[in-house]
Amino acid sequence: MQDPFKLGEKLRQFRVHFNFTQEYVAATLHVPKSTYCEYEKGGSPVPNHLVLRAAALFQVSPEVFFTTAPLELGTKRTDVGTAHVPNVPQDMMGAFLRATDEREEKLFEFMKAQASTMNEQAAMIARLLRGGLNEHLWSPR
């Protein structure tokens, strides 16, 4: 699927502009370097939550990523040019990112609990099959 906003290209432009390494940006976005490289090359779609984290890292509004206008980066880090949209206050962005991390942690805990429940159910089914399902269903209780 073609990315009309060229998110990967914009990530690369900002990274180069700020003189950041791919390793640094990947670690800051909490993704493996190989995944980040795929984002930059356009080989994988960039998830929205990572766009928000990248906006905070590069100190720009997330809207910068969702415009078809090319980035016109100035020579100074703070001069983002015509693609710049007024910044979201950094305390708001920080609060959003913390909330996102908390939701991710809660989702992870839920998924672990679901996997544990599924493992218990699978073990019970295996015991029933090994012990003879018919014997279990028809034996007096």
Image (cartoon, rainbow, N blue to C red):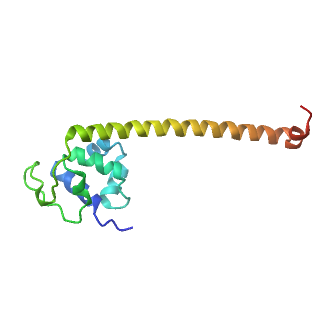
In depth, the one of 31 and 124 nearer the eye is 124
Instruction: Name the residue at the left extreme.
Output: 75
Seen at 31% across and 60% down, the residue is 41
Q: Is residue 20 visible?
A: no
Seen at 18% across and 64% down, the residue is 70
Q: Position of residue 98 (x, y in %)?
A: 33, 36
Q: Position of residue 84 (x, y in %)?
A: 15, 55
In depth, the one of 35 and 85 nearer the eye is 85
Seen at 9% across and 56% down, the residue is 74
Q: Is residue 14 visible?
A: yes
Quarter of the N terminus within the rendering = bottom left
Quarter of the C terminus within the rendering = top right
61 on left or right of 131: left
Is residue 43 positioned above or below 131 on the image?
A: below
Seen at 17% across and 54% down, the residue is 85
Q: Position of residue 68 (x, y in %)?
A: 23, 66
In depth, the one of 71 and 97 nearer the eye is 97
In depth, the one of 104 and 19 nearer the eye is 104
Q: Position of residue 52 (x, y in %)?
A: 29, 48
Count of numbered labels shown in the rendering? 0
58 on left or right of 134: left
120 on left or right of 13: right
